Image (cartoon, rainbow, N blue to C red):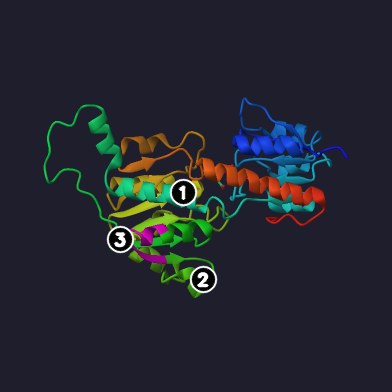
Amino acid sequence: MAKPVIWVTRTLSNATLERAARDYEVIWDAADAPGSAEDIIAMSAKVDGIIPCHSEHFTADVVAQLDPRLQIVANHSVGVDHCDLPALKSKGITVTNTPGVLSDATAELAMMLMLGAARHAVTGDRIVRSGEWDSWSPAFLVGKQVTGARLGIIGMGGVGRALARKARGFDMEIHYHNRHQLPPEDEAGAVYHESLDDLLAISDFLSLHCPATPETIGLMNNDRLARLPKGCVIVNTARGNLIDETALLAAIETAHVGAAGLDCFATEPGGNPAFATHENIVMMPHVGSATLKTRDAMGFKALDNLDAFFRGDEPPDRL
Ligand code: 8YV
């Protein structure tokens, strides 16, 4: 039987590309450019499945123009805000994602951003690297300690829970807000706040781990930022549009927000140049899941979903 044809839109890990080439007829371009709307529409007539990243946007308009040949979109991501799920569903296209396997890597980056923001990592690195470090004082780069501090987590899915586990190792007190309270074994002592405003009011540190949906876009606006204790450190490794960047900038400028660690931005790639003048904002270019171990696991999970689909089984991560 002929192998199904799939389009791998970006440069996935070597192990993923090798396994894909073994089991499928693969279209993949080493140039590694994001797929445009036109690319997606044109490719849909040539392939049975696509493994996209969050860089390929399946908007309602794109989905309306997809060729009926395309049967499955097996995302190489846990977030699916780049996909219009109702449009894909009504077109009969199966959609899957990669939950679970990127939780630890993303939580590690959240921890790095939290510590880096709390301890002036950008300024410290700059002055040592540039040779500007010419004096020392006990009043120098005094930061905020995480030990014993309250960490508020918004969204206690896989990544939120992984961050809670890591933060417990730093003796932080874990609080969270989620659509539903977790069972005690998943809470592991974390304090549930049914009201988001209540969580914000006690968060010395705040980390965002919810998906971007119409309900959560712009979640951290002027009003919610004002509810945080003065000097709160905010971390975002989820999606840039959860934060109103103008509001965050204003809160940083008044020092109401003490520091921020951001891996996601409203505009990607690119980020927000207005943040660059603030060294208490530590920034990374959307690389939360970028470890080799996790890239392999994400690629293999996307392929597991494709394999099940083309075998005629239910893909394990069907949305
Ligand atoms: C990925 C992500 O880097 O999984 C997600 O939702 O944002 C990131 O882990 C990216 O989507 C890779 O395809």
Which segment did they paint magenta?
166-175
Amino acid at dot 2? Leu
Mark 2 and mark 3 in contact (Cβ < 8 Å)?
no
At mark 1, the secondary structure is loop
Amino acid at dot 1? Thr
Neighbor class of circle 2 (other Cα within 10 Å; few <14, some 14-19, many 20+) is some
Instruction: Using residue 213 as the reference point, say whether residue 131 is left or right of it.
Output: left
Residue underneath mark 3 = 229
Count the marks: how many? Answer: 3
Work out whether 309 lies above or below 20: below
Real-space Cα distance between discs 1 and 3? 21 Å
Q: Which mark is residue 49?
A: none
- Closer to the chain start, of discs 3 and 2, is 2
- The quadrant of the picture occupied by the C terminus is bottom right
Q: Nearer the viewer, residue 55 or 131?
A: 131
- Closer to the chain start, of discs 1 and 3, is 3
